[in-house]
């Protein structure tokens, strides 16, 4: 494993940081309160090629390997404090763009990937249902075949990007009696008749719109099927490996931002006649923040390296997701504590960072589910 960035990668990351510092300066306290998505920020990300990072250049993407992608997304998270906007980008990348690249037909790739890469179109993923959360394959949404169409019926309860998305990957069963072997994925455009979206209000990541999505006699052509009939569990597990391995790349950048901010604060804030960083309890908290940042980064890079080599990464991705999400939450709590009462004020932004980070223990499979999965892969 060699994680030394080459000159081209360093130039890309430096460019992303310099651009993002200027591009994402809106008032996040207000945007968070109102829950507004930064559409123009998304479009500028599109001009930079970020929504199409893994997509080959002939389909309009940046053609990056997994390690370069996580490096770029980490730097983006360092320079852009809008965690919600970046979460939307990650949802789009790992649940729509990468599955399309992996199992899409040539026609599907040509139809969707240029628009998804340029930022003109936004993607989202509809798996979770009211009665099927952690036990995702217990889903009840059905896909009934009639001639050259499938007819979808069902309800999805938590779909990131749904209110702004143009296309969703929708998981439905063609035969509930088959269990996971009946699950099939469809590319459904949100403008299709029979699709309705209702905005979901939530605690954090408020600048990333979430929706409930209902399908009522929603007709899609058979060529909207992503992968074979019954291949949904394979598509989902593959997509989850990428998602769990890479979705917290920007969180590592956010942790670096919060760590550096906390060090600056601990050097400047004086109590009892000296900088608070001179107090062992404050210093120890900063050392622990640094440790968690470095271990998170190493896990992120190692899993991305495995993905780039096309090597099995299921266990590593689960470890990466679980470790970084816990580290991110702890990092926000530490930063807030170091800032004292100031940290508790909304205008300081740290309470928002904490609310944003808490979601990471839940999405992509809760950390309890990651723990079960890791234990079962250890033969327990
Ligand atoms: C910010 C955010 C974005 C999301 N985006 C999407 C999206 O884009 N698309 C999508 O389809 N879904 C999305 N989700 C939904 C997410 O995947 C589910 O919330 C998650 O899988 C858990 O399901 P649940 O909420 O129904 O909880 P439940 O499965 O009901 O779990 C409730 C609690 O029980 C625990 N639990 C459940 N089973 C076990 C077990 N076997 N062992 C130990 N503990 C267990 C869980 O860990 C949790 O603490 C998102 C969620 C969040 C918070």
Image (cartoon, grey):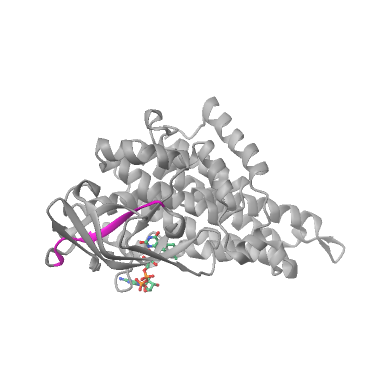
Q: Residue 366: in sight, yes or no? A: no
What is the x, y in percent for residue 173? Answer: 19, 62
Whether residue 168 appears in magenta in the rendering, the answer is: yes
Q: Decide which of 133, 228 is in the foreground and name it.
A: 228
Secondary structure mostly seen in the magenta stretch: strand
Whether residue 124 appears in magenta in the rendering, the answer is: no
Q: Residue 357: in sight, yes or no? A: yes
Q: Quadrant of ligand 1?
A: bottom left
Quadrant of the image for the C terminus? bottom left
Q: Is residue 237 left or right of residue 40?
A: left
Residue found at x 63% / y 55%: 287
What is the x, y in percent for residue 373? Answer: 30, 61
Q: Decide which of 157, 352 is in the foreground and name it.
A: 157
Q: How many numbered discs sit on the rendered protein?
A: 0
Which span of residues is magenta-colored? 166-176
Q: Residue furthest right?
A: 273
Q: Residue furthest bottom?
A: 131
Residue found at x 75% / y 56%: 265
Q: Is residue 177 left or right of residue 120?
A: left
Q: Is residue 130 above or below residue 294?
A: below
Q: Residue furthest top?
A: 7
What is the x, y in percent for residue 122? Answer: 43, 49
Q: Is residue 157 above or below residue 49?
A: below
Q: Is residue 328 left or right of residue 321?
A: right
């Amino acid at each position: 494993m060699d994680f030394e960035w080459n000159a081209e990668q360093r130039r890309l990351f430096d460019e992303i940081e310099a651009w993002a510092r200027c591009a994402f300066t809106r008032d996040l306290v207000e945007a968070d309160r109102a829950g507004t998505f930064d559409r123009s920020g998304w479009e500028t990300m599109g001009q930079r090629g970020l929504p199409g990072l893994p997509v080959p250049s002939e389909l309009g993407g940046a053609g990056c390997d997994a390690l370069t992608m996580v490096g770029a997304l980490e730097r983006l998270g360092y320079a852009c404090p809008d965690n919600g906007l970046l979460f939307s980008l990650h949802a789009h990348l790992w649940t729509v763009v990468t599955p399309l690249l992996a199992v899409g037909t040539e026609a599907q790739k040509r139809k969707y990937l240029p628009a998804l890469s340029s930022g003109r179109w936004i993607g989202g993923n509809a798996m979770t249902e009211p009665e099927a959360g952690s036990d995702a394959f217990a889903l009840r949404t059905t896909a009934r075949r009639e001639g050259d169409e499938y007819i979808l019926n069902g309800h999805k309860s938590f779909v990131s990007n749904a209110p702004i998305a143009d296309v969703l990957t929708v998981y439905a069963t063609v035969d509930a009696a088959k269990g996971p072997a009946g699950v099939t994925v469809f590319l459904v455009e949100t403008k299709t008749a029979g699709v309705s979206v209702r905005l979901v209000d939530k605690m954090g990541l408020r600048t990333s719109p979430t929706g409930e999505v209902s399908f009522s006699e929603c007709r899609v052509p058979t060529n909207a099927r992503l992968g074979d009939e019954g291949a949904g569990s394979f598509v989902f597990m593959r997509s989850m490996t990428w998602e769990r391995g890479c979705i917290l790349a920007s969180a590592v950048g956010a942790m670096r931002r919060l760590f550096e901010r906390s060090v600056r604060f601990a050097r400047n804030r004086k109590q009892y006649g000296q900088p608070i960083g001179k107090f062992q309890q404050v210093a120890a908290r900063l050392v622990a923040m640094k440790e968690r940042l470095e271990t998170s980064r190493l896990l992120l890079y190692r899993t991305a390296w495995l993905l780039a080599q096309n090597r099995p990464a299921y266990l590593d991705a689960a470890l990466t997701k679980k470790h970084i999400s816990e580290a991110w939450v702890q990092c926000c709590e530490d930063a807030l504590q170091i800032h004292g009462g100031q940290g508790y004020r909304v205008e300081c932004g740290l309470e928002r960072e904490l609310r944003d980070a808490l979601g990471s223990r839940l999405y992509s499979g809760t950390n309890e589910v990651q723990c079960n999965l890791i234990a079962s892969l250890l033969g327990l």
